Amino acid sequence: MKPQIRILLYSILFFLYLTSTHFLLSLGEILKTDPYITLGCGFGVLNLIYAFLALKWKPLLNILCSAGIAALALFLALKFTNLHLFLKYDPYQVKTAIFTNAVLSIIFWEIVYQVKIRTKF
């Protein structure tokens, strides 16, 4: 896949992460579930759609990578917000968690992509 296409796909994925977070949190309130579970499942679905439409790998690899990246990115985003680095700009750390999750997901997708094309899974 050409770098320009990957950058475009990552930009779309980043935009989807930013715009879908509010919807997923609202859905979690309606369903009365834990917000972390709702966000994790929602981001997992976004990653799954990305994997099947953009990467077109084997289905099992798509599912494993999607679930793993969603869980790891959400976990690390929460750990990053616990550092309280941007309290002056984001007192509740919500924007920091959203941006960190989106950026980490994109970084992890690029890592998985690079490993895949070099090892020929």
Image: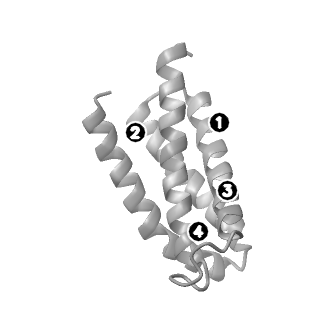
Specify the quadrant that holds the C terminus.
top right
Which residue is tagged 1?
A: 64
Q: Amino acid at mark 4?
A: Ala
Above or below 41: residue 50: above
Under circle 2, the secondary element is helix
Q: Amino acid at mark 2?
A: Leu
Which residue is tagged 2?
A: 53
Real-space Cα distance between discs 4 and 2? Answer: 26 Å
In front: 115, or 17? 115
Which residue is tagged 3?
A: 76
> Residue 45: x percent and y percent?
55, 52
Q: Amino acid at mark 3?
A: Leu
Asked which quadrant contains residue 60, the reply is top right
Under circle 3, the secondary element is helix
Mark 1 or 3, which is nearer the eye? 3
Q: Residues within 10 Å of mark 4 (few under 14, many from 20)?
A: many
> Residue 97: which numbered mark, if any?
4
Q: Tell me which residue sits at (33%, 38%) in the image.
A: 6
In front: 89, or 39? 89
> Residue 86: x percent and y percent?
56, 76
